[in-house]
Amino acid sequence: MHHTLTKPAAGLALLMMLAACGQAGAPTTADIQQVIRSAMQTENQKASGMTLGLFSGPYDPADLVISHADCTAQDNGVYRCAVTAVTKNGTNTAQLSFKKVDGRWTLVQNVG
């Protein structure tokens, strides 16, 4: 039995392959910025709970801009990145690790 794809089915298959390709590779600076801002918001919530609501945490996620990220693939889908962030307090670079879990980039604990 010989099967051929119809034009709509072939187009759908191509779109699915392209979408899958878009999920491969290192995180972008926008991905990294999103992950770090989320982590900052989580830390703010923890700090707010410890201050009895009298003052806010020390982090302002809106103040953070990731200006550069140089990522290298590691084992198990982890990317080790030299991330440069600019805030009103200056520019800093840190080594951070990221992994895509359930289609979303997450910050993973650095080992070593």
Image (cartoon, helix red, strand yellow):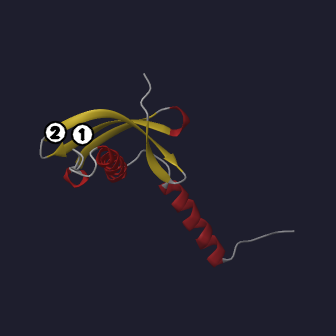
Image location of residue 87, percent across then percent down: 16, 46
**Vertical comparison of 17 with 33: above or below:** below
Residue 67 lies left or right of residue 82; in this view the side is: left
Q: Secondary structure at mark 1?
A: strand
- The type of residue carrying mark 1 is Thr
Give the mark nearer the N terminus: 1 vs 2: 1
Residue 99 lies left or right of residue 85; in this view the side is: right
- The type of residue carrying mark 2 is Thr
Task: Look at mark 1 in the image and give the residue it sits on.
Answer: 84
**Vertical comparison of 6 with 29: above or below:** below
Marks 1,2: beta carbons within 8 A: yes
Image location of residue 42, percent across then percent down: 36, 48
Task: Look at mark 2 in the image and give the residue it sits on.
Answer: 91
Residues packed near mark 2 inside 10 Å, few (<14), some (14 to 19) or many (20 plus): few
Q: Secondary structure at mark 2?
A: strand
Q: Residue 35 versus residue 4: which sits nearer the camera?
A: 35
Image location of residue 31, percent across then percent down: 37, 52
Image location of residue 15, percent across then percent down: 55, 67
Taking the spot 31% from the left edge, 43% from the top edge, the residue there is 50
Q: Residue furthest right?
A: 1
In whole angstroms, how far apart are the C-alphas of marks 1 and 2? Answer: 7 Å
Residues packed near mark 1 inside 10 Å, few (<14), some (14 to 19) or many (20 plus): some
Taking the spot 19% from the left edge, 52% from the top edge, the residue there is 63
